Image (tube, grey):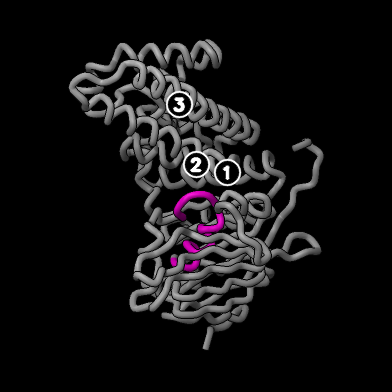
């Protein structure tokens, strides 16, 4: 987009659920731009965030199989629909799963204003979504695989085609693995599949590296050592990323050579030991100049929040759409200073935000224009300003 182009800020105005997780049926009207969902654990707060997260490529914030989302005891599948305000217009987006006559579930369905859409990637024309959940709290000290999935989620928010690219790459790797299991694999078949792997792998590595480079540049623009959410120094590290510095075609050629030369080793391991599937997202705590995994738990949480806030700004800049931000149990583990700073930062983003927390008091410092709901099993009530839901 052009830098001076206005940023669109779509807002969810209505959420309709049918047989989704704990909800047999829900029809919720939403007016606020900053929306808080409060209620006891297990009441269904995160389920609502998960429903919204399905309007993006991938499997949503829990990464669950779609069949797991269907309400226990439901005779059919599930359905989620939202009414999205986009300026002066409104668009209806829907997704869901239907049970076939034999009892099996069919493929996921997506609709835009009642018309069938090819995939969830089509929703990216209308909204972008980013999220932060407690499952990500240990991302810096977790496995490289966890960080790659986190990285791919960052990329998906700016390039909805990235998921298809990664899936195609994974399928090609599996095909090569099966060939290598054979006593005397056909070399021409291996050459062909490795050519495909190299092209796809370099494409995956390129968009990952470009996204991280843009995010790092944006973080540098707003760098402030005194911020309650410290700035992060981030980069993607791996052999494939080193080859990218030599140019796209050279990187593809080197990857193909590495795959060919590594056939005996990969056959023994049962997998390819080189490629973007072995890369890692490296993060450092900028003000302290230490690896993120050596920071305290509180510092890691603040660092992660800072990355998500920066990522939301990047999504808006690259797509022209201020993303809808989903924050699960975000406020409970922040001290009052960081909590107030978070609400202020979220207000500045310009997009709609949905937050969850067990205690309504955690959201007392939200702007008056915000909306707070009390979530109870199977129902959601509005909490009046300064009052309690009945």
Residue in the foreground of this view, choosing between 390 and 191: 191
Q: Are marks 1 and 2 in contact (CB under 8 Å)?
A: yes
Q: Where does residue 36 sit, x and y in percent of width and height?
A: 55, 68
Q: Residue at x 53, y 25 (%)?
A: 206
Q: Which residue is mark 3?
A: 201
Query: Tag 3: Cα neighbours inside 10 Å, few (<14), some, or many (≥20)?
Result: many
Q: Residue at x 44, y 67 (%)?
A: 47
Q: Let me know if residue 100 appears in the view.
A: yes
User: Helix, strand or loop at disc 2?
Assistant: helix
Does the magenta segment cover residue 56? yes
User: Helix, strand or loop at disc 3?
Assistant: helix
Q: Which residue is mark 2?
A: 163
Residue in the foreground of this view, choosing between 102 and 353: 102
The CA distance from mark 1 to mark 2 is: 7 Å
Q: Where does residue 350 sit, x and y in percent of width and height?
A: 69, 54
Q: Which residues are magenta?
A: 47-60
Quadrant housing residue 367: bottom right
Q: Which residue is mark 1?
A: 160
Could you tell which of marks 3 and 1 lies nearer the N-terminus?
1
The CA distance from mark 2 to mark 3 is: 13 Å
Residue in the foreground of this view, choosing between 199 and 64: 199
User: Helix, strand or loop at disc 1?
Assistant: loop
Does the magenta segment cover residue 219? no
Query: Tag 2: Cα neighbours inside 10 Å, few (<14), some, or many (≥20)?
Result: some
Q: Quadrant of the N terminus?
A: top right
Q: Residue at x 55, y 53 (%)?
A: 120
Q: Where does residue 299 sit, x and y in percent of width and height?
A: 42, 43
Could you tell which of marks 2 and 3 lies nearer the N-terminus?
2
Q: Let me know if residue 310 appears in the view.
A: no
């Amino acid at each position: 987009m052009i830098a001076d182009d206005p940023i669109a800020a779509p807002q969810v105005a209505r959420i309709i659920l049918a047989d989704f997780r704990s909800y047999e049926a829900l029809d919720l009207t939403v007016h606020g731009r900053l929306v808080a969902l409060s209620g006891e654990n297990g009441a269904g707060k995160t389920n609502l965030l998960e429903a919204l997260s399905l309007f993006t490529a991938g499997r949503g914030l829990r990464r669950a199989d779609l069949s797991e989302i269907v309400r226990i005891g439901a005779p059919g599948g599930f359905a989620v629909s939202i009414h999205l305000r986009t300026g002066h217009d409104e668009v209806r987006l829907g997704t869901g799963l239907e049970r076939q006559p034999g009892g099996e579930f069919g493929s996921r369905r997506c609709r835009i204003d009642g018309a069938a859409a090819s995939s969830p990637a089509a929703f990216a024309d209308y909204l972008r979504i980013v999220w932060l959940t407690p499952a990500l709290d240990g991302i810096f000290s977790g496995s490289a695989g966890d960080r790659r999935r986190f990285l791919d989620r960052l990329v998906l928010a700016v390039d909805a085609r990235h998921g298809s690219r990664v899936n195609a790459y994974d399928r090609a790797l599996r095909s090569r693995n099966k060939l290598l299991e054979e006593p005397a694999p056909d070399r021409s078949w291996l050459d062909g599949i490795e050519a495909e792997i190299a092209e796809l792998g370099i494409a995956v590595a390129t968009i990952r590296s470009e996204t991280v480079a843009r995010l790092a540049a944006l973080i540098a623009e707003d760098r402030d050592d005194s911020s309650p959410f410290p700035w992060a120094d981030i980069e993607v590290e791996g052999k494939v990323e080193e080859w990218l510095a030599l140019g796209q075609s050279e990187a593809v050629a080197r990857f193909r050579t590495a795959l060919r030369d590594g056939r005996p080793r990969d056959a023994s391991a049962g997998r390819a030991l080189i490629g973007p599937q072995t890369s890692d997202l490296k993060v450092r705590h900028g003000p302290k100049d230490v690896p993120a995994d050596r920071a305290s738990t509180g510092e890691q949480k603040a660092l992660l929040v800072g990355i998500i806030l920066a990522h939301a700004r990047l999504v808006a800049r690259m797509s022209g759409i201020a993303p809808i931000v989903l924050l699960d149990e975000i406020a409970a583990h922040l001290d009052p200073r960081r909590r107030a700073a978070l609400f202020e930062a979220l207000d500045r983003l310009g997009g709609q935000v949905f937050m969850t927390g067990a205690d309504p008091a955690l959201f007392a410092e939200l702007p008056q224009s915000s909306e707070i709901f009390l979530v109870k099993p199977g129902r959601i009530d509005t909490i009046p300003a300064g009052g309690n839901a009945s």
